[in-house]
Image (tube, rainbow, N blue to C red):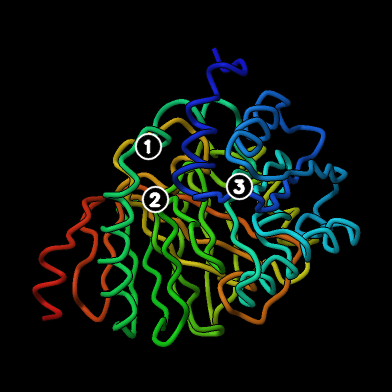
Amino acid sequence: MNELADLIPTARRVVDELLALQPEERVALITDAGTPPQLTGALAGCVSAAGGEYVVLEMPTRGLLRNNELPAMIERALEEADCLLGLTRTSGAPTYAATTKRLLDAGSLRAISMVMRPLEIFTGGGALADYAELRAEGERLGDIWRRGRTMRITTPAGTDLVAEVSGEDVVIECGYADRPGMEAAFSDGEVSSRPHEGTARGTLVVDGPVAHVGTAAEPLRFTVENGVVTGFEGGGPQGRAMRHILDTVPHVTNIAEFGIGLNGACRRNGLFEEEKKARGNVHVALGDNIFYGGTVASPMHIDMVLYNPTVELDGITLVRDGVVELEPAEAARA
């Protein structure tokens, strides 16, 4: 399993359908030492079969303080690219680098993020979803979200977090990046935005997987005031890892993103990149929010998954105990 031949159907879907690559378009595949060569080879072969031209750009694996930083040579190469496929295993740099955001905003690049994912994500679970259906549902949720002002997230584990969201960019990541300026992921299926900087307040209790940390035996608990983490409790190796990040990484205490998962095919498998897309899960991110239109630059963007959430937007329920409720929310907004 997961040899080159097993990845070809996924690679074709990414290149031909989701990216909608056109002949003579130029594709940058950004990798690192952990990127499975089978994945790079499958995608490169499908780019060539579609009439495109590709380059493979391998970046070094870096520590926490340079986690979102692309090498200057790769940044310059992206200026000449039409499409970006981020394939790094150890960082989210192709997605969260400021240069990527600038080129997306300028409409000169479109991108699909496949970063920080093991091979198994690309051949099962959320990768097998109906992405046309996901896209349509994401647009519906995005339309409701854009008209809201205040979001509240609660969970049985103890989360009660509130923030202002009005006027922020709403990001619909449902697989497709088929027009200039669009960004998506694979596997995919979420709608998200950043809360207003300085407005998040309450308690955040994380009982799902956490980027760069893993899943703790006991939930991680954060106290949030004025948009930043002001207190933390958590034991075991994951708690110690999170404490180290909070103590050493600049601006990582910022509440950077709220996201709602829509992909019903995603598995509960301990992988944050799959679970954060799972239907009815919520993720809250710490750190960098530049990708979401914010002003807080941090070396890290840390997604943290919450189970069985209830999400309210101006008192209208979008998710109730882990069940997405689009139709009632649309009716309430009508």
Relative height, residue 218 to residue 171 (above, below)? above
N-terminal of the two: label 2 or label 1? 2
Residue, x 28% and y 74% (percent of image)? 143
Relative height, residue 155 to residue 121 (above, below)? below
In the rendering, at what x and y percent does residue 115 appear? 64, 44
Kind of residue at badge 1? Cys
Relative height, residue 78 to residue 61 (above, below)? below
Kind of residue at badge 2? Gly
> Does the CB distance between marks 2 and 1 fall below 8 Å?
yes
Total count of labels: 3
Residue 41 visible? The answer is: yes
Q: Which residue is mark 3?
A: 211
Q: Furthest-right residue in view? A: 73
Relative height, residue 55 to residue 154 (above, below)? above
Residue 230 visible? The answer is: no
> Is 44 in front, or is 35?
44
Q: Is residue 263 left or right of residue 210?
A: left
> Does the CB distance between marks 1 and 3 fall below 8 Å?
no
The Cα–Cα distance between marks 2 and 3, rounded to whole angstroms, is: 17 Å
Say which quarter of the image contains residue 264.
top left
